[in-house]
Image (tube, coloured by chain):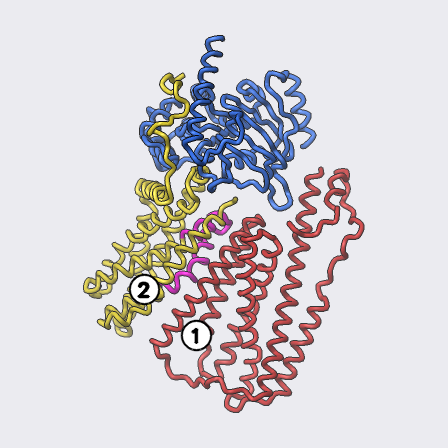
Chain colours: A red, B blue, C yellow
């Protein structure tokens, strides 16, 4: 465990059995849940929506429903970004056995699941008025569905293992194999779609975006990246706190 | 007595000569010292996260020696055994069995010289005793696995039930089969974790004989047990482990049984 | 005390043990697993019965006037293949957990990968065994002329079995150490089985419809690539699932 120790463990071990451990000198105060990052991210997202809803002209053919796109696409990109982070931190963990890498992977997976869910719910909401159906096995949407399955499997696996080292190792293996799977899903779905012409739906091709829309999209994307970073950071710090608590409890037990 | 001594010395000389020849023949077995330590561990550490289950253990045992290892629950005895068996990799330190390091070449050469007996039988319930021991013999690369398996089963007095599925045997008989499995490849180091559990008189006698036979062939034993009298009866050395370290390590001859027992009880209750 | 071995505590002659290499050790593990399975036969029989039951249920859930048999059968065949394969994979590492037999395997002087390869080989034979019964059963129940394409179908079955066994054996090793073993194995494995099932089913239906083999080739390429990548990746990943 590479969490910073403050000498608290030693003092606890020497304490007599009946007493509770007193906080050591210089221990960091409990970090607030809502910190600067989260506030900044919230502001950015609100700003992005204000801009998207009121200050960006609606798209010609699709109308107001198209505005969901500003939510949908950045969420999708961030979902894949989150998975990339899970993949990299999994490799780092197996290579260096640094527990922090595992905690970052866990945080990124949870946030990634959140974003993936957003994509999968906004997709149909966008699609229904435009394509006439709630769900199409659109290549990108299908790939995102599989990403959701992998995230869900990853988190259920983590939930099923109590021992931290085992959990970290297994999650890392799954993280790496899952990343190897994505290209195969992509190829399979792509091949499936090219050989199976779908019923004709009115699917407007991505229009070349006028600058205003492009700017809104970029702004929204940056806001979402900020949300991703803020949430991962908060989740990671929560994990650190929990780990420190577990360590304290263990050393308290050991000192009796 | 003198006869045994001379037999011992001639055995040791023969063992020494054969060791030397083996070392020269086998490139993996680079001699580290002229001492004939069967097992030598140096500064073994095994950490699980922040907790050090084994915290700097060093020991050296020669052929024929038996170390009885005592200690309270959670002292790290099982972890130490698993380290020496090659089931766990050490976080730091090294261990050599028959001159070969556990860390070299994936530890295979070292593991081939180690036998493990524990209270779990490590057998496949659906297979027969013979099949179980033969499987082990093959995995250790023995040339004539069927013969070796029968020899081991006979030594443990369980050869008459060799073809019955293991699940139909009583716990005591299963333990005997498990011991046969552990000794079939004639290991240099035999690690025993409470091996007498569940054995009846015949089984205990067979085990004691088998352990003595192994020691006569130049093997070293490491015996983990909670039964002090049993351990001290077999041992040439005795150690007490606590929180991952040896707090006492001495030759059996130097130890007075009664005072050892009370010292041990003190240590154990201090931890409770 | 046995007299015979007193004179030579360590033998140097031709009787000296030769540690089994990767292939030999894998073979030993596979043989052991198959012996256990053969002795009890319950898992194989259950998987077989499950496959046949599944085929039956699908039959009665099918409206023959809406979908032709030749369109339905490939999908049914490969979906049942997946789920009956999972039954076999479930018990793969369970046998090592009882009585801590896994410790003996890990203490043996064999490479860790041999344990994985041996078990994967045994699982492959298990799955192939179920398929040998299931494929003719599909031909029988759904009245589809699978016999026409039996050689290609055999080849697809081999590749598909290899794919699901490679991933399933690894996840079985992991799942057996968790609290939700029976739930976790399907949940983790099924996303990985999808490319295999897709490729197998699409190829089968094309071949059945008499389309030229060249059309099936892209799917086979995906299947081959999947097998290659995941057999290697899972064999490499296996030692990381062990506590070392």
Query: On screen, A39 above or below A57?
Result: above
Q: To which quarter of the image does residue A225 belong?
A: bottom right
In this view, the residue in front, C23 or B238, is C23
Q: Residue furthest top?
A: B2
Q: Give residue A36's mark.
A: none
Residue C161 in the image, given as x and y percentages of width and height: 33, 56
**Looking at the image, do the residues carrying marks 1 and 2 touch, with CB atoms under 8 Å apart?**
no
Residue that mark 2 sits on: C200
Task: State the predominant SS element of the stretch in magenta.
Answer: helix
Query: Where C148 sits versus A157, above or below?
Result: below
User: Whole-percent x and y of residue C106?
Assistant: 45, 40
Q: Chain of mark 1?
A: A
Q: CA distance from mark 1 to mark 2?
A: 20 Å
**Which disc is residue A139 wearing?**
1
Q: State which chain disc 2 sits on.
A: C
What stretch of residues is rendered in magenta? Answer: C169-197
**Residue C40 visible somewhere in the drawing:** no
């Amino acid at each position: 465990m590479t969490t910073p120790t403050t000498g608290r463990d030693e003092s606890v071990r020497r304490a007599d059995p009946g007493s509770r451990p007193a906080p050591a000198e210089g221990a960091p105060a409990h970090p607030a849940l809502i910190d600067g990052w989260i506030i900044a991210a919230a502001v950015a997202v609100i700003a992005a929506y204000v801009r998207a809803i009121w200050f960006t002209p609606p798209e010609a053919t699709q109308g107001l429903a198209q505005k969901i796109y500003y939510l949908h696409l950045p969420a999708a990109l961030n979902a894949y970004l989150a998975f990339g982070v899970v993949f990299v931190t999994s490799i780092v963990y197996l290579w260096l056995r640094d527990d922090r890498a595992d905690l970052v992977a866990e945080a990124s997976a949870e946030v990634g699941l959140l974003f993936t869910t957003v994509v999968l719910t906004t997709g149909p909401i966008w699609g229904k008025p435009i394509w006439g159906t709630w769900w199409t096995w659109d290549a990108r949407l299908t790939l995102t569905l599989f990403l959701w399955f992998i995230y869900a499997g990853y988190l259920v696996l983590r939930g099923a293992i109590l021992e931290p080292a085992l959990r970290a190792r297994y999650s890392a293996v799954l993280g790496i194999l899952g990343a190897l799977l994505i290209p195969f899903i992509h190829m399979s779905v792509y091949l499936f779609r090219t050989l199976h012409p779908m019923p004709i739906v009115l699917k407007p091709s991505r229009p070349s975006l006028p600058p205003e829309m492009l700017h809104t999209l970029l702004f929204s994307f940056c806001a979402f990246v900020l949300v991703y970073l803020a949430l991962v950071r908060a989740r990671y710090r929560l994990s650190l706190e929990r780990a420190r608590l577990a360590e304290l409890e263990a050393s308290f037990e050991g000192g009796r | 007595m003198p006869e045994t001594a001379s037999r011992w010395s001639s055995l040791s000389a023969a063992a020494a000569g054969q060791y030397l020849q083996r070392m020269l023949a086998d490139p993996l077995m680079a001699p580290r010292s002229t001492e004939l330590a069967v097992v030598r561990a140096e500064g073994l550490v095994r950490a699980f996260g922040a907790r050090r289950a084994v915290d700097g253990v060093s020991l050296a045992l020669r052929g024929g020696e038996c170390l009885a290892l005592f200690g309270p629950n959670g002292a790290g005895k099982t972890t130490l055994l698993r380290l020496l068996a090659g089931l766990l990799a050490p976080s730091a330190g090294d261990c050599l069995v028959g001159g070969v390091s556990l860390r070299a070449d994936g530890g295979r050469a070292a593991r081939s010289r180690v036998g493990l007996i524990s209270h779990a039988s490590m057998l496949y319930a659906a297979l027969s005793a013979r099949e179980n021991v033969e499987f082990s013999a093959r995995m250790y690369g023995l040339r004539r696995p069927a013969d070796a398996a029968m020899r081991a089963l006979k030594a443990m007095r369980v050869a008459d039930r060799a073809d019955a599925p293991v699940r139909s045997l009583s716990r005591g008989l299963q333990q005997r089969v498990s011991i046969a499995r552990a000794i079939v490849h004639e290991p240099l180091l035999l690690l025993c974790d409470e091996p007498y559990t569940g054995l009846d008189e015949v089984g205990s006698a067979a085990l004691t004989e088998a352990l003595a036979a192994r020691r006569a062939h130049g093997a070293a034993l490491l015996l983990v047990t909670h039964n002090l009298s049993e351990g001290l009866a077999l041992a040439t050395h005795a150690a007490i482990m606590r929180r991952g370290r040896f707090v006492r390590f001495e030759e059996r001859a130097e130890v007075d049984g009664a005072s050892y027992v009370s010292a041990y009880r003190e240590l154990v209750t201090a931890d409770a | 005390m046995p007299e015979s071995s007193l004179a030579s505590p360590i033998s140097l002659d031709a009787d000296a043990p030769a540690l089994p290499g990767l292939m030999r050790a894998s073979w030993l593990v596979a043989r052991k697993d198959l012996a256990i399975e053969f002795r009890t036969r319950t898992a194989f029989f259950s998987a077989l019965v499950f496959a046949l039951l599944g085929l039956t249920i699908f039959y009665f859930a099918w409206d023959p006037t809406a979908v032709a048999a030749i369109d339905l059968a490939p999908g049914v065949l490969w979906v049942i293949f997946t789920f009956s394969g999972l039954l076999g994979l479930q018990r793969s590492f369970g046998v090592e957990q009882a009585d801590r037999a896994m410790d003996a395997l890990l203490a043996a002087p064999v490479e860790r990968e041999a344990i994985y390869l041996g078990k994967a080989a045994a699982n492959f034979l298990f799955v192939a065994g179920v398929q040998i019964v299931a494929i003719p059963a599909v031909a029988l129940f759904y009245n589809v002329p699978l016999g026409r394409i039996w050689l290609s179908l055999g080849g697809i079955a081999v590749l598909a079995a290899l794919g699901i066994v490679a991933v399933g054996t690894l996840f079985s090793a992991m799942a057996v150490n968790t609290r939700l073993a029976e739930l976790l194995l399907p949940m983790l494995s099924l996303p990985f089985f999808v490319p295999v099932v897709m490729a197998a089913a699409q190829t089968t239906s094309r071949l059945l419809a008499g389309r030229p083999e060249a059309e099936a080739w892209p799917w086979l390429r995906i299947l081959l690539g999947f097998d290659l990548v995941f057999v290697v990746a899972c064999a490499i990943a296996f030692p990381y699932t062990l506590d070392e």
